[in-house]
Amino acid sequence: MVERSLETSRQAISRLRREIDEVLTPLVPGKKCALLDFPHHPNVGDLTIRVGSDRNAGDRAAANIRKQGKLTLAVGDRKSVAFARVRFECSVVLRPNMAFRIGPIGAAAFLT
């Protein structure tokens, strides 16, 4: 394995894409799953940050997770893992930021 300090950006993105697949693939094959709060705008992180900081939304989420039964929550940072393990009655896994699943994009994409 390449030392992370020596990785190119493309190598890092490829590694993170593999990590996402390793975490999520066992959870999904042949099973029903739901993408919650699907973004309808270019900056997908804003919605998650806003909802995550709203206490009522957290209470509603906890109640819905409890009703759902068996559920796995895949979150993108250690702070969220700690929060979810205390707050929600479900399995919690850490996965890289889903933006890396898109893969590398060229500089030209930012110019259009």
Image (cartoon, rainbow, N blue to C red):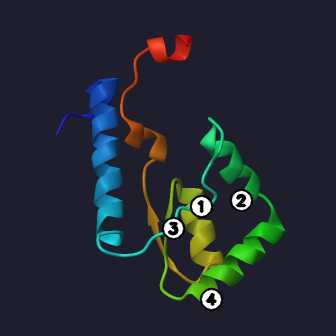
Work out whether mark 4 precedes mark 2 in sequence or the reverse, and give the earlier one: 2
Name the kind of residue labelled 1 in the image: Ser
Per the image, the residue denoted by label 4 is 67
Helix, strand, or loop for circle 1? helix
Tell me the CA gap for discs 1 and 2. Answer: 9 Å
Per the image, the residue denoted by label 3 is 34
Per the image, the residue denoted by label 2 is 52
Name the kind of residue labelled 4 in the image: Lys
37 shown above or below 47: below
Do residues under tags 1 and 2 come within 8 Å of each other at their CB atoms?
Answer: yes
In this view, the mark in front (4 or 2): 4
Work out whether mark 4 precedes mark 1 in sequence or the reverse, and give the earlier one: 4
Tell me the CA gap for discs 1 and 3. Answer: 19 Å
Which residue sits at x=80%, y=61%? 54
Tell me the CA gap for discs 4 and 1. Answer: 21 Å
Work out whether mark 1 precedes mark 2 in sequence or the reverse, and give the earlier one: 2
Work out whether mark 2 precedes mark 3 in sequence or the reverse, and give the earlier one: 3
Q: Position of residue 8 (x, y in %)?
A: 29, 24
